[in-house]
Amino acid sequence: MPVRSISHFTWQVLRTAKRSKKPVTGRELRIAPTRMTKNGSFLTKLVEEGLLSRVTGAAADPFEATYSLTEKGEHAAEFGECEFQSRATITVQQPPPAPPKGKKKK
């Protein structure tokens, strides 16, 4: 599997979850109140990537849900990198080229 480094913000979120003895709420994981973290979609993204698991709550209210690290998330919090699934490439069949247009014969 390919390995990629994680962003500094993601690393900070994962380290916060790692330092906690019990599952943390999404509100506690919003360590930087920026416009990118305003709606909680960063938490949903971390769950989809397999770095965090949702212990309680639902995706509809990410700040009230509690989260814990997965094994993959613990590795990323420790080393700043994680394995990811490469997306399959989709090949699109191209239409055959049109025949060249030449001068009409009389």
Image (spheres, grey):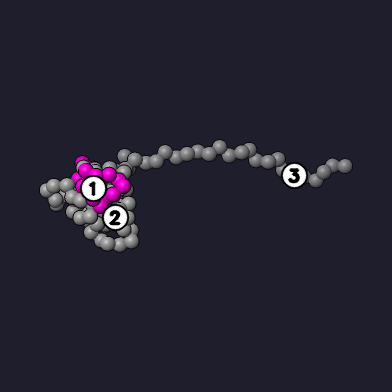
* Number of the label disc, if any, that sits on residue 65: 1
Q: Is residue 77 magenta?
A: no
Disc 1/disc 2 C-alpha distance (Å): 23 Å
Q: Is residue 7 above or below residue 92?
A: below
Q: Residues within 10 Å of mark 1 (few under 14, many from 20)?
A: some
| Part of the protein shown in magenta | 56-71
Q: Say which label, 1 or 3, has the lower sequence index.
A: 1
* Residue 62: percent from left, percent from top: 27, 50
Classify the position of the C terminus by image quarter: top right
- Spatial CA distance of label 1 from label 3 is 64 Å
* Residue 100 shows in this picture: yes
Q: Residue at x 26, y 57 (%)?
A: 9
Q: Residue furthest right?
A: 106
| Residue 94 figure quarter | top right
Query: Distance of mark 3 from mark 2, alpha carbons?
Result: 53 Å
Identify whether 35 is placed above or below 67. below
**Which residue bears the numbered disc 3?**
101
Q: Which residue is mark 2?
A: 7
- Residue 77 visible to an observer of this rendering: no
In this rendering, the label closer to the viewer, 1 or 3: 1
User: What amino acid type is highlighted by mark number 1?
Assistant: Ala
Camera-nearest residue between 69 and 58: 58
- Residue 26 locus on image (x, y percent): 23, 52
| Quarter assignment of residue 13 | bottom left
Q: Secondary structure at mark 1?
A: loop
Magenta: main secondary structure equals: loop
Q: Residue at x 21, y 43 (%)?
A: 56
| Left or right placement of residue 49 versus residue 19 in this view | right
Q: Position of residue 45 (x, y in %)?
A: 32, 48
Question: Disc 1, disc 3: CB below 8 Å?
Answer: no
Q: Are marks 3 and 2 in contact (CB under 8 Å)?
A: no
